Image (cartoon, rainbow, N blue to C red):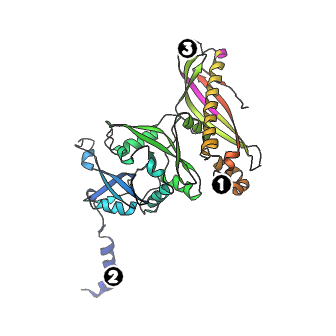
């Protein structure tokens, strides 16, 4: 060998090793892509909870391609029981002939029964937060019955149940539903010790799932304490400004009328600083359109439109006050975002009361909340703004 080559030999060897490709790479056809996880409470073994973990794994052959449709199922569900999520997941991997890939996990489903166990929800989600390759954008939902049954639903137009469930949450057009919540959002609530809400789903047929309402998770005792459906859920969404879609139905002059919500926002005000008797005012602003009316009143006439506007605002105010009574007086749990408002706009006061906001002294339950509604009803070619002030 030419002596001139000797000085650069180490460099050549270095490039030979580093540029030789991904020697430890796992080919895509050798991976098992995890799409969803369902967690149920299997049994209570002498005071020790036994969990059932169900994992939904994508079968690429069932998906097919644009030019060649796949045949058979595009997924498979594997279930195992154990005392912890991590070890049970390892046990499931013994039934899978490919390396599990968790980077495509989109959904975690928790059964209502499990979420009602104190500290259980926080402990379960902690495993997903700690996982090295787990995304914070994973959706989390509560199943009204068994969580794994939602992964067995076979919709007619979607090949993977997990995809169907995420689309339900993203496309829900009802005032009684909330926006999807991600594991990162839940982790933040747990870290700052605050109550929060999670979407509530239920199976209604072998091929259909219903977005039933909202699950309420209390800071203390750190568990699911109730669920909001119907008027409770609608009122909560109006107060928090989350009612961006959906409709409200009420009576106008004895006949049914339906209003479509086209925009919603809310503004909170603190009227005093007495922590033992705090007073809040919530101003709800809405825009809506009349979509259905069974009566004979001509709402295209401006003098008659006022009747519809008043009926609409009265109904929104009623629903909102129902939610206040439910959360403040009955459950005494704040998932109406008053804690968030105080933390941002009245931080000094918040630091004094946050340890006893919706538990202990429970300043939230002792507060007074007044609801005001301002609505704009639109129709082709005209827009009229109205005001309805609270008592």
Name the residue at 34% across, 52% down: 54
Q: Residues within 10 Å of mark 3 (few under 14, many from 20)?
A: some
Task: Point out which mark residue 295 bears.
Answer: 3
- Outermost residue on the front side: it is 46
Name the residue at 37% across, 46% down: 162
- Reading the image, the residue beneath label 2 is 10
Q: Residues within 10 Å of mark 1 (few under 14, many from 20)?
A: few
Residue 168 painted magenta: no
Magenta range is 285-303
Q: Mark 3 falls on what kind of element?
A: loop
State which tag comes first along the sequence, 1 or 2. 2
In the foreground, 206 or 328 = 328
Residue 64 seen from this side: no
Residue 289 painted magenta: yes
Q: What whole-number distance in Å separates the C-alpha atoms at marks 1 and 2?
A: 69 Å
- Reading the image, the residue beneath label 1 is 360
């Amino acid at each position: 060998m030419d002596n001139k080559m000797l000085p650069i030999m180490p460099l050549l060897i270095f490039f030979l090793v580093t540029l030789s490709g991904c020697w430890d790479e796992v080919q895509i056809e050798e991976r098992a892509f995890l799409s969803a996880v369902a967690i149920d409470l299997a049994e209570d073994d002498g005071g020790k909870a036994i969990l059932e973990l169900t994992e939904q794994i994508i079968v690429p052959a069932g998906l097919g391609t644009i030019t060649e449709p796949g045949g058979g199922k595009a997924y498979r569900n594997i279930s195992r029981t154990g005392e912890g999520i991590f070890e049970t997941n390892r046990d499931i991997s013994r039934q899978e002939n490919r390396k599990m890939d968790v980077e495509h996990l989109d959904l975690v489903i928790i059964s209502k029964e499990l979420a009602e166990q104190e500290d259980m929800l926080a402990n379960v989600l902690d495993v997903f937060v700690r996982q090295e390759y787990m995304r914070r954008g994973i959706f989390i939902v509560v199943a009204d019955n068994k969580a794994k049954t939602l992964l067995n639903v076979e919709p007619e137009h979607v090949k993977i149940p997990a995809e169907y469930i995420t689309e339900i949450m993203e496309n829900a057009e009802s005032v009684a539903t909330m926006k999807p919540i991600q594991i990162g959002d839940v982790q933040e609530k747990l870290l700052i010790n605050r109550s929060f809400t999670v979407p509530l789903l239920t199976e209604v047929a072998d091929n259909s799932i219903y977005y039933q309402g909202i699950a309420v998770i209390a800071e203390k005792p750190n568990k699911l304490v109730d669920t909001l459906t119907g008027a409770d859920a609608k009122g909560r969404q109006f107060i928090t400004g989350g009612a961006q879609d959906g409709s409200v139905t009420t009576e106008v002059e004895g006949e049914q009328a339906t209003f479509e919500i086209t925009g919603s926002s809310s503004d909170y005000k603190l009227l005093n600083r007495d922590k033992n008797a705090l007073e809040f005012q919530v101003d709800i602003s809405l825009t809506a359109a009349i979509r259905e009316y069974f009566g004979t009143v001509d709402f295209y006439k401006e003098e008659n439109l006022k009747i519809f506007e008043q009926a609409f605002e009265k109904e929104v105010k009623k629903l909102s006050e129902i939610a206040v009574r439910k959360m403040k007086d009955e459950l005494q749990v704040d998932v109406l975002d008053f804690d968030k408002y105080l933390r941002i706009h009245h931080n000094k006061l918040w630091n004094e009361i946050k340890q006893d906001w919706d538990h202990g002294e429970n300043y939230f339950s002792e507060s007074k909340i007044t609801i005001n509604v301002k609505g704009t009803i639109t129709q082709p070619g005209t827009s009229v703004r109205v005001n309805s002030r609270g008592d």
